[in-house]
Amino acid sequence: MKKLSLGVNIDHFATLRNQRKEVYIDLIDVAKTLKKMDVNSITVHLREDRRHIKDNDLENLVKANILPINLEMAPTNEMKKICKTLSPFACCIVPEKRSELTTEGGLDVKNNLSNLESILFDIKQKKQIRTSLFIEPDMNQIKLAKKLGVNAIEIHTGKYSNLFEEGKYNNELKKITEAANFAHNLGLEVHAGHGLNLRNVKNIIDIKSISELNIGYSIVAQSIFSGLENVIKMYKKLMN
Ligand code: PXP
């Protein structure tokens, strides 16, 4: 099995910066710190309403080439064009609702099949861009993702994370484990993310078919108390 990679979602560094309409926090400095701490990639979600990451943030991060950029994006023509123009290392297609505070569930691949097929067809013209779909731990969604020819799936761990707080997570963890093993056996790379934190991440780390974790909010939140470098050290310690 491949060594587990850590991708850090830096959207909420931008949220803080935007709150005061300041030019800092500098996302390039964040990227440099993450590189220094041996983080493997950076995730950014360019939302339709640009509430955190802005177009020029994405351009600057891709140009600076400090760490591989995983662009999370809705399956729209606008995002497809941006992705093809900037050619990030990877793109992860996610569902997006204007009213949600964060990505609430996985993609409904079945009911979006022709749109996803067309978006992925275009993105895959740029052969170097790795593609992935953010989905629930559901075998049917995984089979369709495989049919669509993506390199990876990212399993939505939001439900597990919420249930963890209530101590009722066993069924959801089992679902994630089975889905991850199923996808891995189909030859897909398996990533996971959403709602993961220092308390609940260990169970997900223990699933050996998962090769990448993407974590954002809890890293930004814990950094207030411990500092970014120390928080990354804490995650790395659990992952090793
Ligand atoms: N992965 C994906 C696809 C996401 O949409 C998000 C949230 O933007 C994350 C990972 C990170 O989630 P969190 O901020 O809860 O760690």
Image (tube, helix red, strand yellow):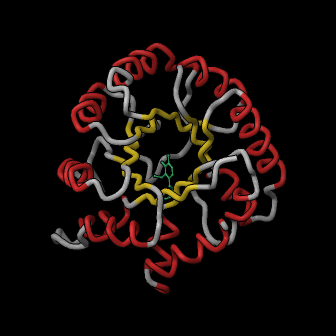
Residue located 24% across and 29% down the image: 81
Residue located 20% across and 73% down the image: 24
In the rendered image, the vertical position of residue 171 relative to residue 107, given as above or below = below
Residue located 47% across and 57% down the image: 40
Most foreground residue, 182 or 5:
5
Furthest residue to the top?
Answer: 114
The image shows residue 146 at horizontal and vertical percentages of 61, 23
Left or right, residue 85 beside residue 133: left
Residue located 64% across and 74% down the image: 237
The image shows residue 85 at horizontal and vertical percentages of 21, 33
Q: Quadrant of the C terminus?
A: bottom right
The answer to which quarter of the image holds residue 110 is: top right
The image shows residue 169 at horizontal and vertical percentages of 79, 56
Q: How many marks?
A: 0
In the rendered image, the vertical position of residue 28 relative to residue 91, given as above or below = below
Left or right, residue 167 beside residue 201: right
The image shows residue 32 at horizontal and vertical percentages of 32, 68
Left or right, residue 48 beside residue 235: left
